[in-house]
Amino acid sequence: MNKIVKYFFLYIFIFLSFGLGAFFYLFNYDFVDFDKAFNESQSKPSIVLDDNNEILFTFKLDKKEPASYRDFSKNLVDAFVAAEDWNFFSHNGISWRGILRSFFVNLRHFKIVQGASTITQQVAKLLFLSQERTLFRKFKDIFLSLQIEQKYTKEQILELYLNNVYFGRGIYGVQAAAQRFWGKSIQELSLDECATLAATAKSAKFYSPLNCLERSYRRRNLVLNNMYKLNFISKNNFNYFINKNLNINKLYNSDNTLLYIQEYIRSLAESTFGKDALYTQGLVIKTTINKYKQELASKIFREKLKIIRKNLDEKLNGGMIAIESDTGKIKALVGGFDFNESQFNRVLQAKRQIGSAFKPFLYASALKTGLDMDDIFVDEPISIELPNNNIYSPKNWDNKFSGQMTLLKALTISNNIIAVKLLLTLGYDHVIKWAKKFQINSDFKPYPSLALGTAELTVKDLATSFNTFANNGIYVSSYFIESVKDCNNKKIWQFKNKKIKVLDSISNSKMVNALSYRIKKAQESLHYNKWIDAQAFGKTGSTNDATSTWFVGSTPELTTCVYIGRDDNKPVGKNIFASSTVFPIWLLFNINLKFDKKIFYLDPSLHEYAINWNDGKKTGEYDSNTVIILK
């Protein structure tokens, strides 16, 4: 037993001796050439290309000449100490208490979830280490921090930190951030502006005033509170500055049509490849965006929405997307009225009820049961008892009823009563199953209102699902980042498209024909001198509570979807109609394009028949009630 104890203590002694020796070796060993690393500033911007391989925009460092410590105001230094490292001027580079606290937190989660970084450790990470969270990297940053403290004064360390800390959007250092946020030099910054910079340094993604003003305010006020606790500022100053507005510069001075796309690519690339790769390693990001279509879509959307806002509601906003029908390549994307006004991308982020734009998918599912476009339904008052014993009585937009009509007419005029009757005839399960085949992934509820478009989709998702009709029944996923190459022209990422056969050629041809009457009737009534340079079909979408208005339509080459609504999703009022808001935007955009493909594919086994769209009977007379169906 004594022998075992003896060897145990011997092994402990050897282990501690080895560990202590390794510690002093690592402490005195130069992991990096500090002086060389501090002076290196080589970087290569990343470029983003359009569909013709022309440069759309670049991502490059926004970094000014380094400032010296004497350029930093006391408020600026105090703000960063209060935000990041209360004991910066007294510790040796490491907060052992913080390390112990984070050790137990990480132990509880079985992974690195919390750090204990001093400003010195952050300098080590900013300049020498990767951003991965591993135990080895944590040890390495401890040793590097101890070395940095040995080699440099506190003032030099803080100088390194403030000149290299990241503020988001390629902005590095307090000089560049002050210029970008307020158009000021660091010497001109007020107390609250110094606190805002310190607040942003915690996490530019969450606390940058360019990303979220509300979070930036909260974090800034926390920093001011810390400054007060540390006796850096007076109570009066604290009370005054926590109520000050940030007054951030407009994000961009120019009316840039690409800003929503640029922001999406920036966010995705930073999270996928890292901000260092995006701003310094010369990535080549190939997109599907067509510059002419993008500029045209942005111009028309903004001009029309400006008028709509003036006439209806200044808080209206929306989005627009154009997708190449056979490939799914996004050729234009407008995420909102003005990126400076709001960075919220309504094409990619806003899920809204699609209203009557759901009806094409409902009618397509009806064709799969043997129903056809000349089948007759009756538009009449109906009342349906719901499972909760409430009575549901759908109405048409004009509160009128038109009696019998064909399914083709009901779809063209977007009749609500017949849509609900059709849903009840087909059954909820059948309609939901087919909606999912079109890749409409929404939380479907088995209620009669499903027929009127309670499904919630983004503009991109609705356009992509509707595009199935333009692509001969084949669903193709949509995208606008095609590939990413490194600076050596090696492809490091490639989009993988998904294609799914949804509708057979016969059913799809019948849908194309039926949906075309919405455009044909518009052409007859509008009497434009110029019209779309190809066949076209489409569908309006409005919700009963007037929260959203949509138009989605296709030519053989392009599917375009336009949405208008409020960001808070509140009702706009009874005077908002798709025909006078979103449809003119869609129409004007397509009128101003030249198409190579003019005609939709129609299954050659089908034959044309002229019918009266009220009673469905074949006719040899051609008047306003005559339509052509395919059978």
Image (cartoon, rainbow, N blue to C red):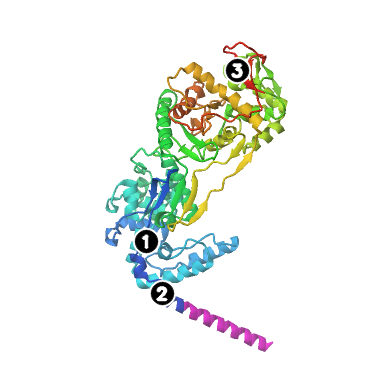
Q: Which picture quadrant has residue 439?
A: top right
Q: Which residue is mark 1?
A: 161
Q: Looking at the image, is 30 positioned above or below residue 494?
A: below
The label on residue 522 is: none
Q: Is residue 285 visible?
A: yes
Q: Looking at the image, is 144 positioned above or below residue 348?
A: below
Q: Which residue is mark 3?
A: 627
Residue 291 lies left or right of residue 579; in this view the side is left
Which residues lie in the magenta part? 1-23
Whether tag 1 and tag 3 are in contact, CB under 8 A, the answer is: no
Viewer-nearest residue: 58 or 590: 590
Residue 503 lies left or right of residue 561; in this view the side is right
17 within the magenta span: yes
Cα separation, mark 2 vs mark 1, equals 20 Å
The label on residue 30 is: 2
Q: Which picture quadrant has residue 128?
A: bottom left
> Mark 2, residues whose alpha carbon is within 10 Å: few (<14), some, or many (≥20)?
few
